[in-house]
């Protein structure tokens, strides 16, 4: 009971006692009045006694309640103890006991959740600490919330980067741009970086946005790709050296085979053997030439000689080169060039090679008497070249890998056609050298469609060199 209630009861008792004193101050004048006075005094005395008793009981109950509430509050505070051993004191069966039970249930639930969260965080920290990759997490305000040991050593960061903005800690422009883009919700392309403290090592920096359900922010991961780059260089050097060394013996083999075939008529079996040797030597020579060209493209040794060239002339030259094969298979080629796409600023020899490989590929994979379509369209800043056929098309499983070197959709058929498996890879390299892109898809009506996007203006390619 509140203190104000006790004060009211005491005040009422004092008022009753004052009334009793007032009654006694007037003496009775008759027996009836005497009896009435005695009755009133008895009632007033009973009221005073009741009020005093109620006030006393209220005061005692209030002290007891304050003590129980204090014990309950202290126990609730101790529920947050690390060991979680504190329990509420269960007393009489009243409202406080129900509150204690409710708090027990809530405390147990929160305790289990906190324990699971602590276990999960400890496991995550253990995993991050054992990772060779650097991991950095920032919130939506750009403040670092997590950085493992690898990230602190690579970037480099202080011992306590948590809570500080990444722009104050990181001095690598590419990484800052990656994190900034991820904070805006974008997923930037990975970039290769070299840190001053690790000049001999190459890292791939990849940032991604954190979804809103996880609090928003960005995650940066640094992968060490030094060994991959070293192995890639060794592979390219090996292929280039072996291809270079194979050119001389292959040239000699082809020369001697042609000399033997030119000597005169041979017996049927030696004649067939010589033709087989000549055919396979020619195929190996084409393979060596393609390998050497890919090695030059990988090493950046092929520059662009940009000139203004006619798209119609490029199409016509490719058809003239492949005319014997097209006529042998009775295949027709349709050409459609939009009025705005008649000219292109590019390296004509390399664009010719791109179209040659695509048309030859379309011819090899199309049936006899098939139709091959060449078209050119223009946009404001791009020129789009398309090569379409009416063949069986490309399986969806093969489309993502169609431009990989040595990858063949139909290996047996490619060998029969004399393909090396490098033509489309060379196409991709030559197009990217111009600053363009190439894609493969299937036509709704059947057949494959290759689309080449090239910049129309001069000097946009990474290997551009003017006239």
Image (cartoon, rainbow, N blue to C red):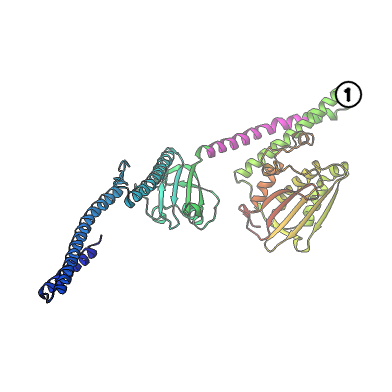
Name the one closer to the observer, 465 or 318: 318
* Residue 363 falls in image quadrant: top right
For the point 65% across and 46% down, the residue is 429
Disc 1, SS: helix
Q: Is residue 102 visible?
A: yes
Residue under label 1: 268
Q: Quadrant of the C terminus?
A: bottom right
* Residue 125 falls in image quadrant: top left
- Horizontal placement of 343 versus 32: left or right? right
x, y percent for residue 339: 78, 63
Q: In the rendered image of this protein, does residue 391 appear above or below residue 188?
A: above
For the point 75% across and 59% down, the residue is 377
x, y percent for residue 237: 59, 36
Q: For residue 254: magenta?
A: yes
Mostly what secondary structure, the magenta segment? Answer: helix
x, y percent for residue 456: 68, 60
Q: Is residue 10 visible?
A: no
For the point 71% across and 36% down, the residue is 287
- Horizontal placement of 30 versus 235: left or right? left
**Callout 1: few (<14), some (14-19), or many (20+) C-alpha neighbours within 10 Å?**
few
Q: Quadrant of the N terminus?
A: bottom left
Q: In the rendered image of this protein, does residue 34 appear above or below residue 463?
A: below
- Horizontal placement of 372 versus 173: left or right? right
Name the one closer to the observer, 197 or 142: 142
Question: Where are the magenta residues, as a range?
Answer: 228-255
């Amino acid at each position: 009971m509140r203190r104000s209630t006790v004060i009211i009861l005491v005040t009422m008792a004092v008022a009753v006692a004052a009334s009793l004193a007032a009654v006694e101050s007037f003496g009775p004048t008759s027996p009836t009045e005497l009896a009435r006075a005695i009755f009133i005094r008895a009632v007033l005395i009973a009221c005073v006694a009741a009020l005093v008793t109620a006030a006393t009981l209220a005061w005692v109950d209030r002290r007891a309640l304050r003590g129980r509430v204090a014990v309950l509050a202290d126990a609730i505070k101790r529920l947050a103890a690390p060991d979680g051993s504190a329990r509420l004191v269960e007393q009489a069966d009243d409202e406080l006991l129900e509150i204690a039970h409710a708090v027990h249930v809530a405390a147990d639930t929160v305790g289990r959740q906190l324990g699971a969260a602590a276990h999960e965080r400890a496991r995550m920290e253990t995993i991050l600490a054992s990772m060779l990759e650097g991991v950095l997490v920032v919130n939506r305000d750009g403040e670092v919330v997590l950085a493992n040991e690898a990230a602190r050593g690579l970037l480099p960061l202080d011992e306590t980067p948590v809570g500080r903005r990444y722009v104050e800690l990181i001095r690598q422009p590419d990484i800052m741009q990656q994190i900034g883009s991820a904070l805006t919700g974008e997923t930037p392309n990975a970039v290769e970086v070299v840190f001053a403290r690790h000049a001999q090592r190459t890292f791939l920096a990849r940032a991604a946005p954190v979804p809103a359900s996880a609090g928003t922010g960005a995650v940066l991961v640094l992968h060490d790709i030094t060994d991959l780059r070293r192995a890639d260089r060794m592979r390219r050097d090996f292929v280039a050296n072996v291809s270079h060394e194979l050119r001389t013996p292959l040239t000699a083999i082809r020369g001697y085979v042609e000399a033997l075939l030119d000597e005169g008529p041979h017996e049927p079996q030696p004649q067939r053997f010589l033709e087989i040797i000549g055919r396979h030597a020619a195929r190996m020579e084409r393979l060596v030439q393609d390998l050497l060209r890919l090695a030059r493209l990988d090493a950046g040794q092929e520059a662009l000689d940009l000139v203004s060239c006619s798209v119609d002339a490029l199409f016509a030259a490719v058809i003239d080169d492949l005319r014997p094969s097209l006529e042998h298979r009775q295949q027709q080629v349709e050409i459609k060039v939009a009025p705005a796409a008649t000219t292109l600023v590019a390296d004509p020899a390399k664009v010719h090679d791109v179209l040659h490989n695509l048309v030859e590929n379309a011819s090899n994979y199309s049936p006899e008497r098939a139709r091959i379509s060449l078209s050119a369209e223009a946009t404001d800043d791009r020129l789009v070249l398309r090569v379409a056929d009416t063949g069986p098309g490309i399986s969806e499983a093969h489309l993502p890998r169609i431009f990989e070197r040595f990858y063949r959709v139909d290996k047996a058929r490619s060998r029969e056609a004399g393909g090396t498996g490098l033509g489309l890879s060379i196409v991709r390299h030559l197009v990217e050298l111009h600053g363009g892109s190439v894609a493969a898809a299937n036509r709704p009506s059947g057949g494959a469609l290759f689309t080449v996007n090239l910049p129309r203006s001069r000097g946009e390619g990474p290997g551009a060199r003017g006239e």
